[in-house]
Image (cartoon, rainbow, N blue to C red):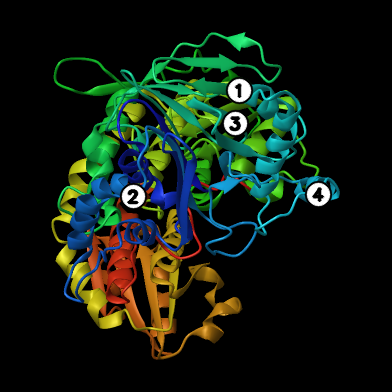
Amino acid sequence: MCGIVGYVGCKEATPILVSALKKLEYRGYDSAGIAVFDGESIIVRKVKGALRALIEDVTKQVVRTSDSMTDDDCDKREAMLIPQMAQSVPGFLGIGHTRWASHGEPSDVNAHPHINESGTIAIVHNGIIENYIKLKSWLQEQGVVFRSQTDTEVVAHLINYFYEQDNDIFNAVLNALHRLEGSYALGVVCRDFPDRIIAARKESPLIVGLGDGENFIASDVPAVLEHTRDVYFLDQRQIAVLYADHVDLYDEDGNKVVKEPSHVDWDISAAQKNGYAHFMLKEIHEQPAAVRDTLKSHLVFENSDGVACGIKFDEIAGSDYWKTAGRVVITACGTSYHAGMVAKYAFEKFSRLPVVVDVASEFRYRDPIFNKGDVFIVISQSGETADTLAAMRLAKDAGVHVIAITNCLGSTVSREADDVIYTQAGPEIAVASTKAYTTQLLCLYLLALQSARVRGFLTDDGLRGCLSELGALPEKMEQILNHQEIIQKFTSRTFNKQKVFFIGRQFDSATSLECALKLKEVSYMHSEAFAAGELKHGPIALVDGDTLVVALATNRAMYEKLASNIEEVKSRGCATLVITQSEGNEFSKAADEIIRIPDCDDSFASLLAVVPAQLFAYYCAVLHGNNPDKPRNLAKSVTIE
């Protein structure tokens, strides 16, 4: 879950490393550090806290110089100070790290990079070394003294152990990797080989950026977009040796391999705030464009008028397996799991297929039942979610057809699945996912419609009607965002509630799960989601004057029943908010506030109803004084168990 970077070239490494870490800070902000070769030795600077603490430690200057400074002001001052860091830590080769703590509490000593006892080898690591206790005990028997409580420090000493045998850093890294169990993305530098960085990955993501007279490693693409668009997405157990003028790739046995680089088309502005106070708010506002781009990439148009008549997935060769499909199994974690929960209703409605939606972390540890004809869908924004990858591999081993939905070209899930669908969301920097969720859900809707058409449950005219509804959603999202002040004002009156419950029925019940998650992620308010009909079976006992109940009511057939549910909670003294379509007048008596989304087909309203809830979560976070881009204890990509 940590972020790692590396640079070798002819420029000062420290500003490049720290600027790259700034773009990866969503992966962890418990501590940060760099290791740079200054021509004689490896200089290591690392501190507990966010990257800002490292900038202040190295430059000896405070970033937030007054209480009146905004986050934007601080970002500008950081940008001014980062180049000055090269004066204290000079050099043209180095590695860096921003940490999400897994082994050992956040502290200066547990921060990365970690070094061997003599300080001649430094490493950064993302992942978990599962056999570190065994390795640590063995190394201690060899006389090694450990400084930290991390699993990572084992790797530095293990590499040093093998290096002392033949003074070849590549062989030392190779031998160490063969003894590591678990997951890793590694960057390694050695004082005696000051012209190269050695990088390796297993399970945890790692890319190599290819520049002109300079090369980079990073955990994710946004870190290198400022410098290059050409990258290697390292395969499992692949090793890279980076020099300033070239990169050599090897397999786990040390044999050279040839690989074509990928070109990334992401706009660099997608990794910048562009005037928004936070990335989360920016990405909420980017949803209309992201949904529009995703639709455009997967639709077939019958004429120049832009009328969509079909669905295409360029990465998928065919769709005949839908004809014999007996069941859909959807597996994911967190926000992606919630997209799958909404998709369950879509598949069952349109293609009449039974659907099982499973949390990947549970799925992988039980003895799951696979049936001939199952279609297995995995969803992962990063394409590197550890539990989701493990579930996918179980399905692959069982011979089940696997479709992956991801935002990341070249990710592990995209390479290992039978078929892949890309969401076209662009970089998502905020930890709390917004546009990734809506684009994932859109792809699931398209997949459900395609399966319905192949199975004969949807006519050509029916498909055109559905695609027309979907095509109108980006503009309707924009209408919601153009009136965000309504949500902002309501939030200012209710952000201090002790409990927030989201309720709904059918599609809305599934959508409410994501709404509750967004709120708890960034505001730290207690929020839960309940199927509205289940209120009487227990949850209503929690409702009182300190409670806000948010009812999602976009299913016209359920208006009256949901209105009764709202009356039930309102009579217990709670505040109520209803998110409904424009003509939902049944809620006027019981609701303290009604937010009306533009009318659309009930089946697709989930894509609109979630937007006000995202804004509500954002404004609650801001009013509580939280940074919604960097919620405590969370990181963007969960690449460890």
Q: Is residue 85 left or right of residue 150?
A: left
- Residue 32 lies in quadrant: bottom left
Q: Mark 2 or 3 closer to N-term?
A: 2
Element on which disc 1 rests: loop
How far is mark 2 from mark 1, CA to CA? 34 Å
Q: Looking at numbered disc 2 in the image, what kind of residue is underneath it?
A: Ser
The picture places residue 457, in percent across and down from the top left corner, at 48, 29
Residue 238: image tag: 1
How far is mark 1 from mark 4, CA to CA? 31 Å
How far is mark 1 from mark 3, CA to CA? 6 Å
Q: Mark 2 or 4 closer to N-term?
A: 2
Residue hosting label 2: 88
Residue 201: image tag: 3
Do the residues under discs 2 and 4 have CB atoms within 8 angstroms?
no
Do the residues under discs 1 and 3 have CB atoms within 8 angstroms?
yes
Q: Mark 1 or 3 closer to N-term?
A: 3
The picture places residue 602, in percent across and down from the top left corner, at 35, 50
Residue hosting label 4: 143
Residue 447: image tag: none
Element on which disc 3 rests: strand
Circle nearer the viewer, 1 or 4: 4
Q: Mark 3 or 4 closer to N-term?
A: 4
The picture places residue 478, in percent across and down from the top left corner, at 17, 49
Q: Looking at numbered disc 3 in the image, what kind of residue is underneath it?
A: Arg
- Tell me the residue at 53%/21% (across/down): 241
Q: Nearer the viewer, residue 587 or 54?
A: 54
